[in-house]
Image (cartoon, rainbow, N blue to C red):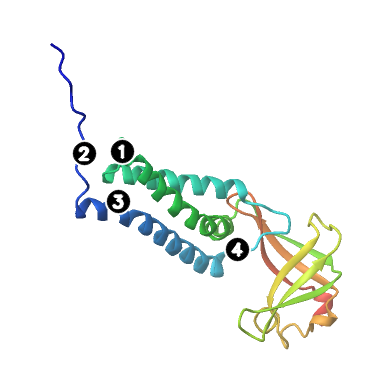
């Protein structure tokens, strides 16, 4: 005589299990923000978050995002979402947390890792520029300055090169240069840890600072 087996159903997760699976997505994202902030502070002293025009870190960024998703997924599996009926919930938590963290990983963490450690020697190129451009600092009347290179020169691609704030980076009387008098700039850069060239400093060339 055949017996009909009643499928086993899992009990709903208790409060402790719910906390164990709901906290990690927020904790992983918070950890990403803390990491990005710490790397940004270190880069302010020892490196730079700015890339040369045309440089890209899309592949390292994708790898970081995938690593984030894999680590979070593995943590949730160990935390109690390994059962087949909880797969959809686990995938949803991983997807939401990863989507929120992706801009931080791609636009902050990857450039910060690249800029903090050099994979090659520092190089300096003195080039002529087409002009100086400005943008307003967020919520301030102060300006950020950019040197515009219209044509590639001395192995540097054309584009806008960030110079910083006039009152911090190259303010008179140290350089005795004004934005409108600059015709040539000295560009200091190096290849970063993740392969993209990092812009370390752009300042008026000596001919423009007398």
Crowdedness near tag 1: few (<14), some (14–19) or many (≥20) residues, C-alpha within 10 Å: few
For residue 10, which numbered disc appears in the image? 2
Is 139 left or right of 16, judged from the image as shown?
A: right
Check whether the beta carbons of the residues at disc 1 and disc 2 lie within 8 A of each other: yes
Tell me the SS state at disc 1.
helix
**What residue is disc 3 on?**
21
- In front: label 4 or label 3: 3
Is 13 rendered above or below residue 156?
Answer: above
Note whether residue 122 is visible. no
Q: Which residue is mark 1?
A: 85
Q: Which mark lies nearer to you, 4 or 2? A: 2
Which quadrant: the N terminus?
A: top left
Residue 116: image location, x then y, percent: 55, 59
Ranked by sequence position, the earlier of labels 4 and 2 is 2
Q: SS class of the residue under badge 2?
A: loop
User: In the picture shown, does residue 21 fall above or below 132?
Assistant: above
Disc 1/disc 3 C-alpha distance (Å): 14 Å
* Quarter of the view holding residue 133: bottom right
* Mark 1 or mark 2: whose residue is earlier in sequence: 2
Label 4 – label 3 distance at C-alpha: 34 Å
Q: Nearer the viewer, mark 1 or mark 3?
A: 1
Residue 49 image label: 4
The x, y position of residue 108, in whole percent, is: 55, 61
Q: Along the polypeptide, which appears first: circle 3 or circle 2? A: 2
Position of residue 26 measured from the top left corner of the image (x, y, whole percent): 37, 59
Q: CA distance from mark 3 to mark 2?
A: 16 Å
Quarter of the image for the C terminus: give it. Answer: bottom right
Separation of marks 4 and 1 at Cα, in angstroms:
44 Å
What residue is rendered at 37% in x and 54% in y? 25
């Amino acid at each position: 005589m055949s017996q009909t087996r009643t499928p086993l159903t899992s009990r709903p997760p208790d409060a402790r299990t719910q906390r164990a699976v709901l906290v990690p997505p927020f904790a992983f994202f918070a950890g990403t923000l803390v990491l990005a902030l710490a790397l940004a502070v270190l880069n302010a002293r020892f490196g730079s978050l700015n890339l040369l025009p045309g440089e890209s870190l899309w592949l390292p960024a994708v790898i970081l995002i995938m690593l984030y998703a894999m680590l979070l997924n593995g943590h949730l599996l160990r935390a109690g979402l390994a059962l087949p009926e909880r797969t959809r919930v686990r995938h949803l938590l991983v997807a939401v947390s990863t989507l929120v963290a992706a801009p931080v990983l791609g636009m902050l963490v990857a450039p910060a890792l690249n800029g903090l450690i050099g994979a090659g020697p520092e190089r300096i190129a003195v080039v002529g520029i087409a002009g100086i451009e400005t943008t307003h600092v967020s919520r301030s009347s102060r300006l950020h300055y950019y040197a515009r290179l219209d044509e590639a020169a001395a192995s540097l691609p054309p584009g806008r090169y960030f110079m910083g704030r006039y009152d911090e980076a190259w303010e008179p009387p140290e350089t005795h240069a004004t934005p409108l008098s600059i015709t040539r700039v000295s560009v200091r850069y190096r290849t970063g840890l993740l392969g993209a060239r990092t812009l370390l400093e752009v300042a008026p060339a000596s001919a423009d600072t007398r």
